[in-house]
Image: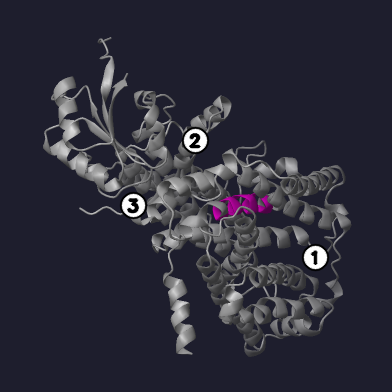
Amino acid sequence: MAKRDPIYGLMAEFDSAQALVDAGRKTREAGYKKIDAYSPFPIEGLAEEIGMHFDEIPLTVLFGGIIGGSTGYLMQYWMAAVDYPLNIGGKPPHSWPAFIVITFEMTILFAGISAVLGMLAFNGLPMPYHPVFNVPRFALASKDRFFLIVFSSDKKYNPVETRRFLETLDPRSISEVPS
Amino acid sequence: MSEQYKSSTDLDRAPVIEPGHTFGTVTEKISAIVLTRPATNGWFIGFGIFFMLTMMLLFATGYLFLKGIGIWGDTTPIGWGFEIVNFVWWIGIGHAGTLISAILLLLRQTWRNSINRFAEAMTLFAVASAGIFPAIHVGRPWLAYWLFPIPNTMRVWPQFRSPLMWDVFAVSTYATISALFWFTGLIPDFATLRDRTEKRWIKMIYGMLSFGWRGSARHWHRYETMYLLLAGLATPLVLSVHTVVSFDFAVGIVPGWHTTIFPPYFVAGAIYSGFAMVLMLAIPIRKIYGLEDFITERHLQNSAKVMLATGLIVAYGYGIEAFMGWYSGDRYDAFTLWNRLHGPYAGAYWMLLICNILAPQVLWIRKLRTSPVALFFISAVVLVGMWLERFIIVVLGLHRDFLNSSWGMYYPTRWDWMTYIGTIGMFLAAMFLFLRLLPAISIFEMRTLLPEAEVKE
């Protein structure tokens, strides 16, 4: 295993959502690639500012829905028309209009479950421990403070230079994140 | 006239949160209910009473399993009594929660943010209460798994052409999606509670529940996409659930059931009773926990308006039922109408008309729409009315159908009542626990409503 850097990154704390969005944009414009931003509520456009280009969730949900719908329909077809056909009120074994409701419900069920599991999986959750939690002030990230981090794995990262750059963003405080 | 109109629109545009709040105060105020506020004697007494009622439910179902459904009032020809009445009533109540959390989210009704959390909890507990009835009414509940496509020793599969099977899938999907929607909505708030508490074991519990949420921008992005898609999926789902419940009746040939107006009229009735329950819960909660800043008069007024609108749809449904009883020329339909108005259960039908059509008309008056006390009582009346509606549909359809040699009467027994009241106890006991253990208002969604959350490009 490669030797881990004892420092995970440098973290700057901001007072407002606006400051965080501006700082995120400036950091990326300064050439930093491996950065992240933390906020107590979703901020529109922030993910794009820090370099997120693709959201996997819609496709995941689409596939979940397709799988659910086809499972629902094929299950009913196989059970009612192939494995054990029963004559119910003279209806044909493959009476597709009657299968619509369950097909629909299964589509929703699978799509909904894949939305949640997909969100968790692509976000790498559950993850009870994370280096950012080592910064005591980070507890405010779930209340009213906004944080920006430059990871030490970034090519441009340099403990002195990066700190100097972050100071130009006028943050409330800057802290080193131990890994 | 113009004066009143002006002030009415002022209320519509009033901020969803009272001015003066910041990210910090919103967070502290809501999380303090869970973390620092001690449980009062009132809470313990209330929870104690409802917990005992829950025990009564367990006792009644235990005795049912011992003796069989003969202890209930169900007889030929009324094979569906309280269990279906209560099932439909509870499922309907649940619908308002999904309407608030999903449909109002898609419609960008930001006022929903302060009531969606406990409305979703209400949905969950209402669906749980509803789910008890079909599970225990099958006679041999240990074989209830036959309802699901699980291989069994007879090698027979469920009968997918029956609306009852559709109902199994609709309700179980609804319960699952509601639970997911509710739980994922809680994840960021669990993180807030984790970071606010001092006690280590509480930190551990909320930390595990939060899945280690840290509010990364990438995470929020996927989270929001998921939340929006879940809302988009839950919207047709919630409309389908009561539609399918109405198919349980409408696909049958019983007079009074066999009509195409049932799906929309059931869905409207569901939202009607659901908003009544939302108000009955919201009014005491905002008072007791001092949340008037977040659940404002605007919320009460909007809920009252939804109630009024859906109540009018329900009234239209009754009107069409009566009209078709005459217009169809079908003697059995005509008799159903006559029997409702003049038969042995006429008292229940007249009560229903008073509770569901007449009483809510007072909501046209703005003063009553914004008066918590008045709204509380009107909501109670509507809930009684909607319960009577299901009673009329289920019991009056069955007790006098085509052959008068097979007419009969339905009398609920003490076990019917104990089970019904027991589910109310269970529902409220769960609400009591919810209020103390989880943030009753979505904290992170409240933050987005504050003016300081706005970001300019």
Binning the other alpha carbons within 10 Å of mark 2 as few (below 14), some (14 to 19) or many (20 upward) gives many
Measured Cα–Cα span from mark 1 to mark 2: 56 Å
Residue at the image point whose x is 49% and y is 48% from the top: B181
- Point out residue B118 in the picture as x, y percentages from the top left corner: 57, 52
Q: Is residue B4 above or below residue B30?
A: below
Figure quadrant of residue B39: top right
Q: Nearer the viewer, residue A94 or A7?
A: A7
- Point out residue A59 in the picture as x, y percentages from the top left corner: 31, 45
Query: Is A93 situated left or right of B401 in this image?
Result: left
Query: Is B446 situated left or right of B283 in this image?
Result: left
Q: Nearer the viewer, residue A67 or A154?
A: A154
**Image quarter in which the C terminus of chain A is found:** top left
Measured Cα–Cα span from mark 3 to mark 1: 58 Å
Q: Which chain carries label 1?
A: B
Query: Is A31 situated left or right of B248 in this image?
Result: left
Q: Is residue B121 magenta?
A: yes
Q: Mark 1 points at which residue?
A: B78
Q: Mark 3 points at which residue?
A: B453
Name the N-terminal-most of marks 3 and 1. 1
